[in-house]
Amino acid sequence: MMPRVLRSTGGFTYIGALVMAVIVGIMASQAAVVWSTAMKREREEELISRGTQIRDALRRWYKVRVIDGKLVSNQVPGNTGNVNAAPPAVAGPPELKSLLQDPNTPGKLRYLRPYALVDPITLKEWDVIRKDGKLVGVKSKSEQVPIKQGNFPFDLPPADFEKKTKYSEWEFVYDRVPPVTATGGAITGLNPSSSPTPSTNKSSSTTP
């Protein structure tokens, strides 16, 4: 009887090992999916970060800033006697690498760090967006479907990012500003006169 008991136990052990192997395989595959999704989310956040850096660098190149939901020039009008005169036009950068060092500025200002020139999704160069021949923004060349479909940073136009089916549809363009809403929107400029200032007056005590 003893040999039969051993054979029965051995068969049970073999089946148990198969079940455990299947369970471990399922858990490993699920862990791989979770890890892959987490990595993709990280790359998405880095894509937004680098794209925003390039957009801001282009704004510095073109000498503009966002105030109260509008793009305003930092330059003095060409005709200083006319307050309504348009500021002088700024030629666009010849290529994206030009943002690393502006040859048109006295100290050859640096607007961008080299790592931002690489698309974190494809690990290759960005797809450059031009308007009337001028470099105005960038986008990824990836055709992958984004995980993120909403809740983008408030300084990004929702129409350029929400509910897109490909990363290549996320466009970081320097002259696109999100609409100002009651609950958020474009970055609004601070009016120095309306900014709170620390009080220097101390209340004086009265003596009876």
Image (cartoon, rainbow, N blue to C red):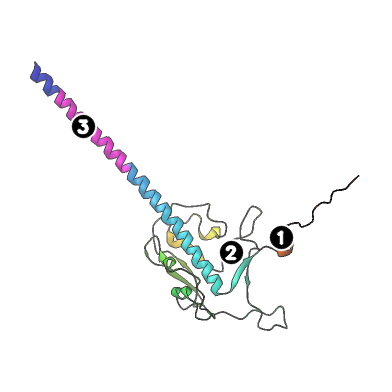
Alpha-carbon span between mark 1 and mark 2: 23 Å
Q: Nearer the viewer, residue 103 or 149?
A: 103
Give the mark nearest the N terminus, 1 or 3.
3
Residue 108, horizontal then vertical, whole percent: 51, 78
Q: Residue furthest top?
A: 1
Give the residue number, with chain letter if any, for mark 3: 17
In the displayed structure, does residue 66 sit left or right of residue 199?
left
What's the amino acid at mark 1?
Ser
Residue 23, horizontal then vertical, whole percent: 28, 35
The nearer-to-camera label among 1 and 3 is 1
Give the residue number, with chain letter if any, for mark 2: 177
The nearer-to-camera label among 1 and 2 is 1
Give the mark nearest the N terminus, 1 or 2.
2
Give the residue number, with chain letter if any, for mark 1: 195
Decide: is 124 above or below 184.
below
Asked if the residues shown at circle 1 and circle 3 are in contact, with their CB atoms under 8 angstroms apart, the answer is no
